[in-house]
Image: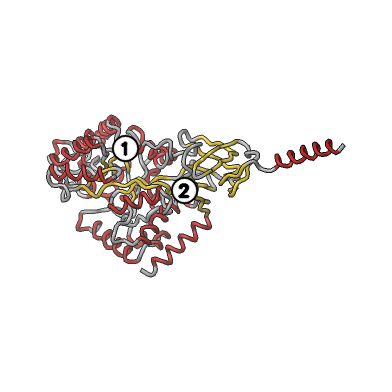
Amino acid sequence: MKSILLILLAFLSLGCRQSVPSSEKDILFADVSVLNLSDGSLLEHRYVEIQSGVITGIFSAPPEGISYTTEIDGKGKFLMPGLAEMHAHIPSPPASREHVEETLLLYLSNGITTIRGMLGHPSHLELRQQVEKGEVLSPRIFTSSPSLNGNSVRTRGEARAKVTQYQKEGYDFLKIHPGIQREVFDALVATAREVGIPFAGHVPVDVGIRQALNSGYASIDHVDGYLEGLVPQNAGVNPAANGFFGYNFTGLADTTLIPSLVSLTRENKVWIVPTQSLFERWFAPVSADVLLKDPEMQYMPVTTLTNWKIRKEQSTAPATGFTEEGWERFNTIRQKLIKALSEGGHGMLLGSDAPQLFNVPGFSIHHEIRGLEEAGMSRLEILRSGTVNPAQFFGKEDTFGKVAEGLEADLILLSENPLDDLEALKKPEGIMVRGKWLDRKTLDKKLNVIANSVKNR
């Protein structure tokens, strides 16, 4: 009898142990709708599991036998991959470490979990490493070399030396700025191919858009050189008289040439970063005083805002030849180029050029998104330009850019579907960067700290 009682107790004990969760994991998004930005489809009522910064499962029902340290209620909400800001700037010395980390937080607070720094500095190499180790709260960083321009590379020898140096130092790519002469540019390109480092950025006037496309840019930013490329060869203009990104040639542009440039872009697999917000805020007929009223200006020091106002008023003063009518024609051509490149080019990358005049880091991406939509890009393609496309651009499709098992947990939780209204991106419920969860309350608290800090500078 005693032995039978012991056997019964053993079975009861086994049953009790089975009712306890068999394992514990980090985070679960419960009952959330997952956006698939590869095709725009929506997976409703999903349970997304995060462990050690990686998406370890997406289930159609609550996982059994598992407890979670953090469970996030996703009912009625939408989960999408974090955005990439593909034309970002990271402060360099003598900027303080506090200023650097504030800038990175401004990007993060707007759902940007990857940035491509477009004006590199040796300090950014160390910062990139610290971010990879989780020592700094920041988006993932890809960084360009210091600027290669008409002053920094004046000879073929200088070009070869600097390209080789920057590749050895570990920069992700080379940043091209204006002013490089054609023979120097050709030496730069040849060396870049030899050592295996991509290059991106501006199109020097002496090179021109067609030669630039045939040279194998990884990306051309600002749609630079394209408007100049619409000027017929028989116009006999001085290329150097192009003005601000071709503004002076607006009246000469032949838009029937757009398809040929788009085709050349596609054939050479060159990505485009429009930075349209730059042309709708800085170089645009909207007053500085109006832009200074935008809520995000509270995160910039007064000295910066004052400088932005001065520079904007100088660059759009009547003496420069800038007029509202001229800008309307200029912007219409840019919008046609953006729409055509989106529909028939190789691919678009989301980038706003921040911080730049009245483009506050993070917040400016929403101005860019609105500008792309007004140019005729679809909502899905705009979202892809900030998620799927950047991952493809970097060859990191197995790391980020989607909500998929095995990828790093860079995520945005939204209260509305951005495919219905892109304004939904402006106020995320929370942001996850490689598994670290920042809810709305935490984000607002960090933003308030920055706003209060800049008041004292």
Q: Residue furthest bottom?
A: 456
Q: Does the CB distance between marks 2 and 1 fall below 8 Å? A: no
Closer to the eye: label 2 or 1: 2
Q: Which mark is residue 271?
A: 1
Question: From the viewer's perspective, is 90 left or right of 314?
Answer: right
User: What number of labels is visible?
Assistant: 2
Q: Is residue 152 visible?
A: yes
- 265 w.r.t. 139: above or below: above
Report x, y in % for residue 291. 36, 59
Q: Nearer the viewer, residue 143 or 164?
A: 164
Dot 2 crowding, Cα within 10 Å, few <14, some 14–19, many 20+: many
Q: CA distance from mark 2 to mark 1?
A: 25 Å
Q: Quadrant of the N terminus?
A: top right
Dot 2: element: strand
Dot 1 crowding, Cα within 10 Å, few <14, some 14–19, many 20+: many
Dot 1: element: strand
Q: Quadrant of the C terminus?
A: bottom left
Q: Residue furthest right?
A: 1
Q: Amino acid at mark 1?
A: Trp
Q: Nearer the viewer, residue 49 or 214?
A: 49
Q: Nearer the viewer, residue 50 or 231?
A: 50
The residue positioned 46% from the left and 48% from the top of the image is: 433
Report x, y in % for residue 36. 49, 36
The residue positioned 58% from the left and 39% from the top of the image is: 46
Q: Residue furthest front?
A: 2
The residue positioned 48% from the left and 41% from the top of the image is: 419
Residue, disc 2:
433
Q: Nearer the viewer, residue 182 or 286?
A: 182
Q: Amino acid at mark 2?
A: Val
